[in-house]
Image (cartoon, coloured by chain):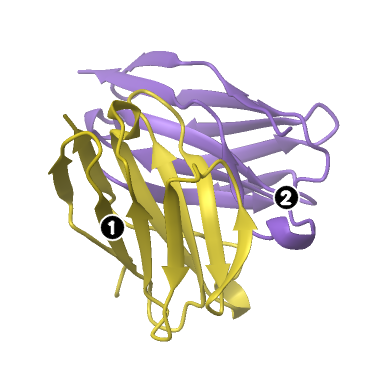
Chain colours: A yellow, B purple
Amino acid sequence: AAGVIQSPRHLIKEKRETATLKCYPIPRHDTVYWYQQGPGQDPQFLISFYEKMQSDKGSIPDRFSAQQFSDYHSELNMSSLELGDSALYFCASRGMGPGANVLTFGAGSRLTVL
Amino acid sequence: GEDVEQSLFLSVREGDSSVINCTYTDSSSTYLYWYKQEPGAGLQLLTYIFSNMDMKQDQRLTVLLNKKDKHLSLRIADTQTGDSAIYFCAESINRGSTLGRLYFGRGTQLTVWP
């Protein structure tokens, strides 16, 4: 079965650079969530989109922005990167119907800021 | 805010049962989840339970929910070394714009000794 695809899997950037992470949800899933997991931490909710509109916002820094496109894929843009942005970034998707209360997570994108 | 608490570590011998406990504070929780994370990997959904249920069994996994005490547990029967991972408890509170957002605990590192 198709899963949530995230790219790139690993990314190394320097301070003050920008980074873009991509997420391709499971086909026919219309809701996408972004989470940030720091080393040894629990995943923290950043932002979510439903039908290409922002549906909820969590602890996302102002330096970050995200959007969902017409094909439902989503991108997380991070600017002025700081050392503390080093983390595993997860995307999850959710559909309608019987699976509507289950979030399926991708494998994550590991960002290292030097 | 929403607080989900878990003990951080659990060690068991192969073949024994493991019980991982979780407490949450928001009585509006609608679904509660258990996710498994292996080193450097994504979040794998193990099982979930609707808040009006008190037990759910799925092969080696048994979930118990005590809604009065806001306590959730995951029992893994016949624990194997391959079960060694971090187990996250998470709650979903469907309230207006927070539909589907998950709040995670810090995770319990399960170590299974041969």
Label 2, residues with CA under 10 Å away: few <14, some 14-19, many ≥20: some
Mark closer to the observer (1, 2) = 1
Mark 2 lies on a secondary structure that is: loop
Q: Which residue is mark 1?
A: A21
In percent of width and height, residue B46 lies at 44, 48
> What residue type is disc 1 on?
Leu
Chain holding disc 1: A
Q: Residue at x 74, y 52 (%)?
A: B30
- In the rendered structure, the residue with mark 2 lies on which chain? B
- How far across and how far down the image is residue B71, in percent? 71, 29
- Disc 2 residue type (three-letter): Ile
What distance separates the C-alpha of mark 1 from that of mark 2?
A: 27 Å
> Which residue bears the numbered disc 2?
B93
Rendered location of residue B108, percent (x, y):
44, 23
Residue drawn 25% across the image and 51% down it: A19
Residue B22, percent from left and from top: 61, 27
Residue at 46% across, 16% down: B8
A81 with respect to A51 (left or right): left
Q: Is disc 1 placed on a helix, strand or loop?
A: strand
